[in-house]
Amino acid sequence: MLTKNDLRRAALARRQALTHAEVAQRSQQLAAHLFQYFPVAQWRWLHTFLPLARKNEPDTGPIIRQIWAGPPAPRLAAPVVQPDGITLKHYALTPDTPLLPSRWGIPEPLADPATEVVPAQLDAVLVPLLACDRQGQRVGYGGGFYDRFLAECRPGTLFIGVTILDDEPVAALADVLPTDVPLHACLTPGGVWNF
């Protein structure tokens, strides 16, 4: 069985080797699959991450723009890393939301208490990942941000992993932790894996 670190190193190298054109094309495919395979119009709130472009993360822009074009469409929320460096808060994301770069350069919505969205409000969460296994366990950057966040969501919230790579899930990860929260599905440029 592979460890998260093994998969993380390999996936980061393959992702960094993609051209900007490949990232753009694959991101369009991700958006198409999301709207094809999931009941997006039925959701009230969808949580999305905002990508770090220099790391070739999936560009969620096509998904966001299509939702904003509506109707009908869910409202969007995006994360803001808190000063403690380990937790997230979430804020509504609209075409008028100011975005500020975090200390890592990730765009984040302006933290306005009036627009805060609590995890229990969310119907679905797009979760960034590098790899996953057939049980829906994911490999991210290793900070645990999303596991802590997903554990706060209400039962029935759909957790959808999103990767720019077209890898099949591995059989099983060797080092799953009790605090790891599994995904319900994984969105890839080639389609969707359901767990």
Image (cartoon, rainbow, N blue to C red):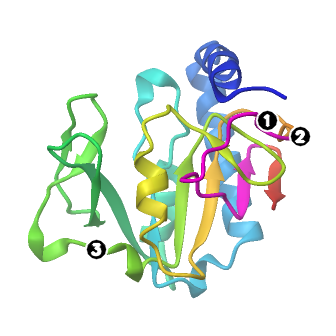
Q: Which residue is mark 1?
A: 166
Image quadrant where one finds the C terminus:
bottom right
Q: At 74% from the left edge and 45% from the top edge, which residue is drawn?
A: 188
SS at badge 2: loop
Q: Residue beneath label 3, please? A: 117
Reading the chain from its start, which is encountered first: label 3 or label 2? Answer: 3
Judged left or right of residue 100, residue 25 is right
* Other residues around mark 1 within 10 Å, as few (<14) / some (14–19) / many (≥20): few
Residue at 18% from the left image edge and 44% from the top image edge: 84
Closer-to-camera residue (41/7): 7
Q: Residue furthest front?
A: 178
Label 2 crowd (10 A; few <14 / some 14-19 / many >=20): few
Residue at horizontal 56%, vertical 39%? Answer: 58
| Earlier residue among tags 3 and 1 | 3
Magenta stretch? 172-189
Mark nearest the camera among 3 and 2 is 2
Q: Is residue 61 magenta?
A: no
* Cβ atoms under marks 3 and 2 closer than 8 Å: no
Gap in angstroms between the C-alphas marked 1 and 2: 15 Å
Main secondary structure of the magenta stretch: loop
The residue to which callout 2 is attached is 171
Q: Identify the element where label 3 is drawn.
A: loop
The residue depicted at 61 percent of the width and 30 percent of the height is 23
